[in-house]
Image (cartoon, rainbow, N blue to C red):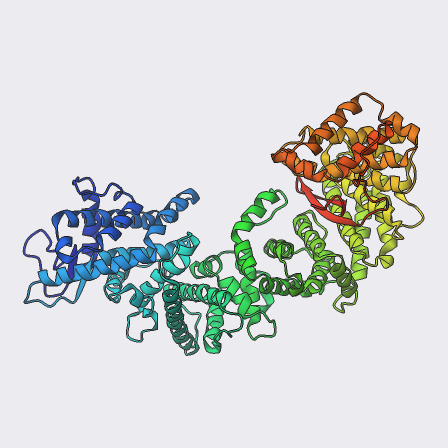
Amino acid sequence: MSSTSSSDTESESDIPNPCSVDALEFARMSTQFIHGDQSASSHSVHPGSGTVRGAAEQLLALSSLSIDETTDDDTLHEISRCSSTILGFLQDILDHHPFQEHERVLDTADLLYLVQEDFLMSLFDYRQLFYRIASQECPRDTAPSVIICWVDVILARLGEVVCVLAAEAPVLDDNSAISASLKKQYEDDSLRAAAQLPEKWLDVLQLMASDHASSASIRLAIRLTFGVKVIAPRLECTLKLQPSMEASISSSILHALGTYINRLGSEIDGSNDPLSASSFPGHHKVTAAMAISIFATMHLQKLLCQDTTVGSPFLPHTLRNILRIIELLIAREDGLQADIMDPHDTLDAARTILVRWGDVMSFCWLVWDDPRFMGAEIVTYLTSVWLHHSESTTQLEDDLDQTIELWYISLAPSLLQCPAAATGALLRLLQHLTGRLCSSSLPLIISDIVLDVVTKSCWAVFEIIRGHEARTALPLVDLGVSLLSVFVLIADTRQMLPVRRFMIDALNVLGPEALAVAFKGVQAVAQFDFGARFDSFLAHQKRQLLETQDLIDDRAVGIYLRVNMALNFLAVLIQSGSDLARHHHTASYLLCASTEHVLSRDASTASQIAYVPTLLAVLAVLQDLDSEIMDNTKPWEDERLGALVLTIGDLSLVLASAAAQFLLSRMRRGPVGCLRSIEIWDFARDILIFIMSRHYLGDGEPLALLIAPTMARVLLDLLDSADPDFARFMISFPWNLGFCTTLRNIVETETGGYMAVLRRRLSRFGPALLEKINVSGGRSGPENSTNAPAESPTPMKLIFYCACNILHPIWMCDLVDQE
């Protein structure tokens, strides 16, 4: 199972002598011999050695044997079976790459057992042992040029597998039409590189610092290190080293990588054309990307885990070279600065490694977190590349919820490692886009690639702010200014709806204070007139509505969706307390036109208009604020609107939520008529009965639980505002008895699951409503009741709910949202 390669040795028969065979022929023989040998049986065969996991575990178990025990026939046979299983697995990956996604999951799961530190240590122990065996068996009168054993074949194949998996494609040099002879030479070099590796695995981790090792052996050492330090953690593989040893080894590896990177940087600086194929061929690019990924991953972990009172090592030369290499790896033919938001549409192997493996992004954000640093725009462009090539893009027809789940997998880990630094990089992207957009006097249509980058940027900003505890460490006001700017600068097309949705989400989680300051600040921006653009945006929505009077096709649906987004934008600004006095005319015109357009339709058609729930929610808060946004005409005072609300309110939970908000605000402005009060009572009671009986399933359950307290508050306010006789009349109908029984069972019975959540949601207004019904019915309530809610209106909190890719605001008082 070992071979010596020498020009002076020849086999004396037709059967090749393993001590004098060509390296490539030995590798081929090893694979073929072992595959055929798998059918043999032996009483000592490990039961799991036919699987990659079993083979790796068996080799680990046998690695502690002495040389005499290892040369036992049964042991050698078992080693050959295990090595054959591993070689066959690795060769299958190389033969069938690229493969389908489900196949990749299986392959990477098995690869886990081959990139563990203790397994590689055992391989190098086997390597020394079989080298000694080969040396003893070699003819005394020949001097072999190199000894190759089965371990070298595994190491060479493992290095290739790590490379193709990381690059997600076979890695060839720039000459794609590489000849068969050159390919054979490359494979031979790979085997010889494996034979040239140091005796111990821990020495391999530092080989890249050597001035004397061949480039092929350094390349293989980096690939194997990448497998252990980058791929293994991704596959949730834990290292077996002691913490103290791990810290010292980590420092040594970082020093070796730094030496390699600095040497590569010097070579690049000395080249007249570093981007040429001869100066920086494909394999060199991939190796450089792997080295940077390893360095970034290990260095970042060291920074995040170290004592904050101890300063991190200052590596200006190494960091400068890392940035220089990254610039070359992601460089375009045109200027970098001009296309910072327009990354490559495809990734080569090196770029794939940079943006999809290790902690390169988090490392770059943390190190170059100040835009004043030289080369900071390179990191901004790298961020753009990373965003664009992280999972799927966003299109109008996409299921956004499913798309967001993919983003959580691909984007969230890097974003949440260094959230403040990541936010800074995202902010620079938005600021750069603002500079590009404001150069035009009209809203611009951006390309699909730019749209994808900015959509993911806005989603990322929303997720970071929502999940970050130390909000004061984030540039909230600057983010607000950029988001407000981009919102009014991009074209008003249906394709922009997803990005506008995430902008509104991000603006909402900024908080009222930060958003109000940002709204004031954006109006002072010298690059463009925000006020004029904002008014133009609102006026455009009104003009579109006027054009839909006779439209019932898909174009009308698109207009309704864009009007809905404009109303959501108004809702965020109103909630923040932003000064909208300058824009009250355009806002008033839009709200009046939106209301009149709905009232001009019959109830069935009106219920299908996408912006109706949002319109009702906005009008609800304007009623409470008695806002001066509106001119003399106040749409909420139109009795036709109140009747329409009750007619369509029970058609969906989204409409029911908006209707309840509107009716609550209407009741707080003054008493309603007796007939209307009964209609409101029946509406809110029936919706609450449906919620308590778990009528709404699937995606409707969260919204049902969310609005249940609002429905109870509507009923409670009705009883509070009614005189005693009329209150007694409202609750006298027989079906109210069943309602009270169900409500009492929920608030008084300890249960689990859905009902437990509903009980918590109704913990304040449920008991208060039951007590009020008892009092109104002539039955006394508990003597020391403390469940009654405050009589005065409470502060409102704005949240957003997305149904069928359509965003709707939900206003909730702090008492309702106390959970």
Residue 773: x and y in percent read 82, 30
Front position in the image: 78 or 324: 78
Front position in the image: 391 or 172: 391
Residue 45: x and y in percent read 20, 42
Q: Quadrant of residue 207?
A: bottom left
Using residue 160 as the reference point, say whether residue 445 is left or right of it: right
Residue 200 visible in the shown view: yes
Image quarter where the N terminus lies is bottom left
Residue depicted at x 68% and y 43%: 802
Residue depicted at x 40% and y 56%: 231
Residue depicted at x 79% and y 43%: 617
Residue depicted at x 84% and y 48%: 590
Using residue 786 as the reference point, say whether residue 690 is left or right of it: left
Q: Quadrant of residue 503?
A: bottom right
Residue 609 visible in the shown view: no
Front position in the image: 236 or 326: 236
Residue 423: x and y in percent read 61, 62
Decide: is 190 above or below 807: below
Using residue 458 as the reference point, say whether residue 543 is left or right of it: right
Residue 254: x and y in percent read 40, 70
